[in-house]
Each structure stands twice: as C-alpha cells, then as structure tokens.
Image (tube, grey):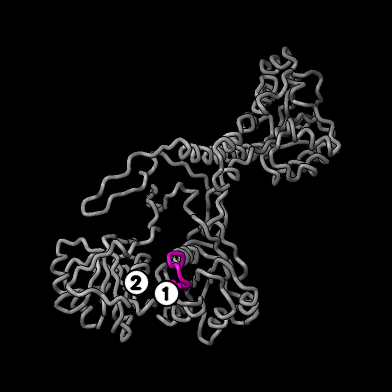
Amino acid sequence: MHTTHSAPGAARPTGDVVPIRRVLVSVFDKTGLDRLAAGLKAAGVRVVSTGGTSAALAGYGVAVEDVSAITGFPEVLDGRVKTLHPNIFAGILARGDRPDDLEVLADHDIERFDAVIVNLYDFGSVIAKPACPPAEAIELIDIGGPSLVRAAAKNHAFSAVVTSPAQYDDFLAALARGGTTLAERCLLAARAFEHTAGYDTVIARWMAGHAGLVAEPGAAPAGGEPSHEPPLAVRFSLDLERRLPLRYGENPHQSAALYAPLGTHLGLAGLKQLCGKELSYNNLLDLDGATRLAGLVAEPAAVVVKHTNPCGAASAAAVGEALAAAMAADPTSAFGSIVAVNRTFDRACAELLLAPGLFVEVIAAPAFAREAVELLTTKPTWRASVRLVEVPAGDPWEATGGMELRSVAGAILAQRPDVRCDDPAAWRVVTRTAPPAALTPSLGFAFTIVRRLTSNAIAVCQSTNLVGAGVGQTSRVDATRIALEKAAGRSRGAVLASDAFFPFPDSIELIARAGIAAIIQPGGSKRDAEVIAAADAAGIPMVFTARRHFRH
C-alpha cells in the first residue's frame, strides 16, 4: 500500500500512517542510542546526523550521511551553526499533501524527513553547578535543536518528532509495523512543544538573573522593617511535571498529584520514599510543615505535626532525646501524626516509636540508619503502613526564583519564603525587668516554633520543648487560652511566644495566672504601652522582636 521515493519531492501517502524511510538524528543525551541505531539499521532507514551523534551512530554500524553533505556547508563557530539551513528545514516542514511544497523540494533537489530525533543540550544541569561561569552556560543554550524539534512538531501531520530516549521503544515499534500513525505523531508533537517550552523557561529564568533584572530594594512598610530583597518578577514562567500521582486530594472525591519544576530535586520535589503505603495529599502538606519547621532549628530537633501544625517539637543534644520530648508534648494528637527530624533517624528513634500505644503515619528525615529501617519495617504493626521518607537538604526555592507559591481561585500568590533566621541581637526588652539569661535559649526556640504555627498563634515552651500551642484562632486571646490549657501545669516557669503583637492586655492577664516566666512577641500594636504596663504589673519580662511571623 505504501509508495516509495521516485524523486526527492515525490508525494507520500496521504493516509494516517507515514512510513519511516529517512530520519535526522542529533542528540546530546546518548542514552539508548545503541538500541535506536540497531532498530534503524535493521529497518534500512536512511540516517542523516551531526557531529558527535554521527560518530556514535557510525560506531554502532549505521551508515550515516553528514548534515554538511546536504547543506553544502561545514559546521562552523564551534558547532553553533550546523543544521540551520533550508535544505534541512524544507525537508522537515514540507507538507505531503501540497503539490506546490513537493514541487519546491523537487526543484531544489531536497528530500523530506519522516522523523526528527533530537534532544537538547543539558542547560539545566550546567547552571546547577556551583558558581557556573556564565560563558559556559551560554554555550549550552541550544539553538538548532529547539528549531528542529519545533519544525517537526509543527509538521506532525507528515513527520514524527522524538525528543527523549524514553520514546525510542515506541518509535521503533512503529517503525517495525510500517510507520507512525497520526495520533502517535500528534502526541509526540505535544510532548515536543512541552519539552521546548520547559527548556526555554529554564533559560529565561537563568537569563533574568544573569542580566541583573532587579529593581531597587523596597521601601520600609509603615511600622515595619526595610525590605532588602529584590522585588518579585513582573513575569514568571514555571514548567511543572507530574512527579507523584496521588490516590485523591484532601477528600476522596478530589483527584490530585504532586508536581515539581523540571530538574528540581530539593525539598519535597526530591523526596525518596523508602517503604510503606503511598503518600497522600494531606501527608504531603503535613510533611511540608514538619520538615520546614525542623529545618529552622540548628540543634538536633524533632517535630510532630497534625493538620500542618506542630503538636510537639523539641531540640536536645541527641535527636532521639528530642523525639521523645516532642512525642510527649501532646500524646493524644501525636497518634497518627507526621514526624520529622533534622538529623539521621537512628535506632534510638525507631525504638522510641515502637513503644506500645504509639503510631505515626509518616517519618521524614535527611537520612535513615539501616538498623532503624530494619526495626520499623519488620515490626508487624508498623511494616505494612508506616512510610519512611528521605527529604534532601538544600534550598527548595531555587527552582521558583526564590518565591513561595500558593494557589487561590484562578490565580497564584507569590512571596519570598519566611526562612531567614531571627537575630536575637535585634530583640529589645520592653519591660522594667529583663528575662533571666537562662531563659534566652527557650525564648529563641519558642519564637522559632511559633513562626510555623497557623495564625493567630501562641507557643508555650519549657526549655526547648513545645508544651502547648494555640493555632488558627480568630482572636489572640483565644489562641492564648488554648495554648495555656494544652500546657496545663507545664506552663509555670515556661516562656510564651506570639507570632504577632497582642492587641489588648487581656492575654497578659491569662498569661500571668498560668505562671509564665517570660514573653516574646513582635510588638507593633497601638496599645503596646498598655500591654507592657500589664506585663510590668504582673512582673513578667517581655521581649519585642520587631518581626512578625503570620502564617495563614
């Protein structure tokens, strides 16, 4: 049924299947090239290629025609120019059902390509190198490759485009059965345009930084500190790929998946699940809250999270000791929670969680000791369900241009993430009495914990242990009351942190009755003087940090 070439511009079948007789191959990633070469050679496909790809294919026994023989021009400018020529692009873009296109090919002795197999210079990996020289990055901006891919994708009615070694098997299967179908070529074209769009997005983001596209630092907001961060971009492109399909979203009737920017493998984008059931949408939200809070603490620390809020958190000399204290803070809430530590999860941690009556949904850590994994995965009540997840260290905001993104209906909110450590040197004692020096570590820990609680938020801490939290309340006095109730008798001699100012002195009255030893808060209320006076009257030292940590 299929015709053969009788002249360079001869008409091809106009049906659904296009035979694969002549291909252009130019790949940066040589993965699977041996398999592709064997298939092309066995089918007798004529192959045109360039530079290193041509040499590799010849090494696999494929007869290759060099591009320069078709263009009549050698590769120049260190390979910057090799395929950008009408003899190449006319052969890709000619429409097989247009007599005038075919006549042009015949007049100029140009042959058509049935497929273009191209993948692009690995620009993303180059710029990921520490202190990558701009000159090196610029040389890895592919010009001819994206042009070839886009041309073949545009003309997918008559030409197939393959952009990944992962597509070779399907392509070779189509070759073996006589050609590609229109549906196959359409899907390949869609993937090709996704590929070039993602490639251009990475380059555009890097180029904006390279060009120094930043404005003046922001002015100081009313009552706040100056912003020394560059303003957010006027335009921002992000190419996301699905990394993890999820059973459902927050509820069973909602479909969901985890997406991440191309090439990003930090934070939850790079998580590695060692064992256990598949992660859920809610698990990932809780993991985000737990790992981000654990990462704010410099000392060995453990965080226990339920519904994105810590119900326990502690730091200690050893991570197992911190985990024990964190689990003890609110044992009822800790059951079925998410646990994160900021050190290797060791045998002592595993033995602690295996105590009767304890169970958690997910354990996250930068790494797991082998014996800890063995213990948790062999215990009958744990092995079938607990999930162990390694989350790599590093700045997860690089791929989003330093921005934290959050969706709202029909739009995206963006802000710089609240990750900068607070500086105790900037704190100011506002009461007549200063907190004892022995309480300084506790105050710092409490103010670190409260910044990852949902506002309005209050944290009560004994030493470096969270013993009571009030979260997500519509009034600060309610958040204070709940935190003190959670702490119960443990509030006496503890410190209390607030994520924002106290608008009225009513919270101070509750705090005084609970026996709190010191308060830390941002300050900034119109009634600060009244709040300070109430603290002085109660004999409670109070520190202002001048930095708010709302989290909605």
Residue 502, picture quadrant:
bottom left
In the displayed structure image, the side of residue 465 where residue 101 appears, left or right: right
Could you tell me which secondary element the residue under label 2 belongs to?
helix
In the orientation shown, which residue stands out farthest toward the top?
107
Q: Which residue is mark 2?
A: 446
Quadrant in which the N terminus appears? top right
Check whether the beta carbons of the residues at disc 1 and disc 2 lie within 8 A of each other. Answer: no
The residue segment tinted magenta is 294-305
In the image, what residue type sits under mark 1? Ala
Say whether disc 1 or disc 2 marks the residue closer to the N-terminus: 1
Q: Identify whether 504 is placed above or below 401.
A: below
Residue in the image at 37% along x and 44% along y: 230
Quadrant in which the C terminus appears? bottom left
Choose mark 1 or mark 2, whichever is in front.
2
Q: Position of residue 273 (x, y in %)?
A: 60, 65
Q: Which mark is residue 116?
A: none
Q: Which residue is mark 1?
A: 313
Q: Identify whether 524 is placed above or below 441.
A: above
Residue 486, picture quadrant:
bottom left
Could you tell me which secondary element the residue under label 1 belongs to?
strand
Q: Position of residue 185 (x, y in %)?
A: 67, 37
Q: Is residue 264 visible?
A: yes
Q: Is residue 1 visible?
A: no
Residue 480, picture quadrant:
bottom left
In the displayed structure image, the side of residue 70 where residue 237 appears, left or right: left
Q: Identify whether 131 is placed above or below 499.
A: above
Q: Position of residue 208 (x, y in %)?
A: 46, 38
Residue in the image at 26% along x and 75% along y: 435
Q: Which of the pair 294/11 is nearer the observer? A: 294
Q: Is residue 213 magenta?
A: no
Label 1 neighbourhood size at 10 Å, few (<14), some (14-19), many (20+)?
many
